[in-house]
Image (tube, rainbow, N blue to C red):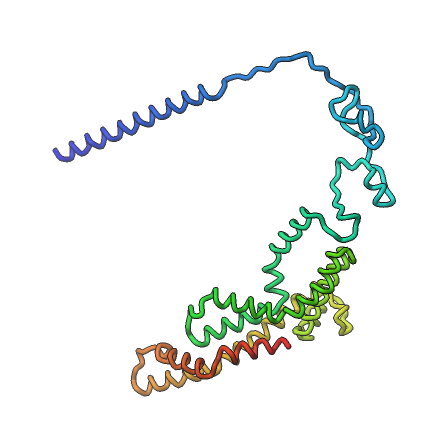
């Protein structure tokens, strides 16, 4: 009897839902029919259409060349050619896109400046990671945290922030040189865009070349099938950047290995003591962690590591 009652209750609930959905559907259809017109009609008021394709010149027939005038319609005059910027302004270039910035004196218009700024912002992470000291710093900090054994202390946000500020500190002379030699003259209209890019890239190239090992440059030059005379000017950016990254990785791993050595000795000593005491089930890292932190604090580890890490770039 209880099962029969439960089934009847379920059937009643189901019928209520079906009826509710049906009523809701009818209401929605009624609303659509009342809100949206079923048909649309248009009237013809004897409009006059022009079917004349007479070519017009907007620089001469400016009054008669407007769209909508009788016996005239859209310009179809070809763009033509020009020999100087003044003639370029007089051409019919309605179907093309041109970018002109203050008669070519180097001052970029506001909209174009915003576009370039957004583009640089999107490329900033790549430039920051691959062409500065950030790579070496963040890898060494990661090795330090792993060697001590604290998996989440300092957290990643702290390591990234520390690496960023150290990167700005190390790159400050390079950034100052770029600002003085490239950004200021370009903003004042003394140099064009091509010279601006060359001047901005030169300090970065000098920084990367000073930190790049010769064998890495020769490796990528040989892969590219180019000959190198040993001068920076003969190294293209496509070779210098990967060479710099490989050198940074090698240097960072060497420093990380040196950081690991004292902490490995502590782990070995603690493991030997635990084995001699018969405590085989006790993980050595649990006991050695406080000793490694104590050693790191007593030796003023952060000052030693960060100070010597920064000095590797000078």
Give the left or right position of residue 302, taking residue 131 as reference.
left
Residue at (56%, 79%) from the top-left corner? 308
Tell me the quadrant of the picture where the C terminus can be found: bottom right
In this rendering, the answer to whether 242 lies above or below 76 is below
The quadrant holding residue 170 is bottom right
Residue 10 x %, y %? 22, 32
Camera-nearest residue between 268 and 90: 90
Residue projecting furthest to the left: 1
The total number of labels drawn is 0
Residue 213 visible in the shown view: yes
Q: Where is 231 relative to 6, above or below?
A: below
How far from the left and from the top, in percent, is residue 215?
Answer: 68, 75
- Looking at the rendering, which quadrant does residue 252 occupy? bottom right
Is residue 223 visible in the rendered image? The answer is no
In the picture as drawn, the residue positioned furthest to the front comes out as 188
In x, y percent, where is residue 305? Answer: 52, 78
Q: x, y percentage for residue 194? A: 76, 57
Q: Is residue 294 left or right of residue 13?
A: right
Residue drawn at (37%, 84%) of the image: 270
Question: From the viewer's perspective, is 154 left or right of 307?
Answer: left
Foreground: 228 or 163? 163
Reply above or below: 145 against 96: below
Q: Quadrant of the N terminus?
A: top left
- Name the residue rendered at 40%, 24% in the picture: 28
Q: Which residue corresponds to the image point at 75% horizontal and 19% vertical from the top-left?
A: 50
Corner quadrant of residue 95: top right
The residue lying toward the viewer, choosing from 275 and 13, is 13
């Amino acid at each position: 009897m209880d099962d029969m009652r439960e089934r009847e209750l379920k059937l009643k609930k189901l019928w209520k839902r079906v009826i509710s959905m049906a009523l809701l559907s009818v209401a929605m259809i009624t609303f659509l029919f009342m809100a949206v017109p079923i048909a649309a009609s248009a009237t013809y008021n004897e409009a006059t259409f022009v079917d004349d394709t007479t070519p017009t010149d907007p620089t001469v027939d400016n009054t008669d060349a407007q769209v909508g005038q009788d016996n005239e319609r859209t310009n179809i005059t070809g763009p033509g050619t020009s020999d100087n910027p003044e003639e370029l302004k007089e051409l019919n270039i309605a179907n093309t896109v041109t970018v002109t910035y203050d008669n070519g004196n180097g001052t970029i218009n506001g909209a174009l400046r915003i576009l370039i700024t957004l583009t640089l912002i999107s490329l900033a992470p790549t430039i920051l990671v691959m062409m500065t000291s950030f790579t070496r710093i963040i890898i060494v900090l990661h090795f330090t945290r792993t060697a001590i054994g604290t998996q989440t202390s300092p957290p990643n946000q702290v390591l990234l922030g520390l690496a960023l500020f150290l990167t700005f500190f190390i790159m400050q002379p390079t950034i100052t040189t770029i600002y003085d030699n490239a950004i200021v003259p370009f903003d004042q209209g003394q140099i064009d865009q091509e010279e601006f890019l060359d001047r901005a890239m030169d300090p970065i190239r000098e920084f990367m070349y000073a930190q790049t090992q010769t064998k890495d440059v020769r490796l990528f030059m040989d892969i590219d099938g180019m000959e190198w005379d040993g001068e920076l000017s003969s190294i293209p950016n496509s070779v210098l950047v990967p060479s710099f990254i490989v050198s940074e990785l090698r240097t960072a791993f060497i420093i990380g290995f040196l950081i690991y050595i004292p902490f490995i000795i502590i782990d070995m000593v603690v493991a030997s003591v635990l084995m001699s005491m018969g405590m085989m089930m006790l993980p050595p890292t649990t006991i050695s962690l406080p000793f490694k932190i104590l050693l790191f604090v007593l030796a003023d580890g952060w000052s030693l590591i960060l100070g010597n890490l920064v000095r590797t770039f000078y």
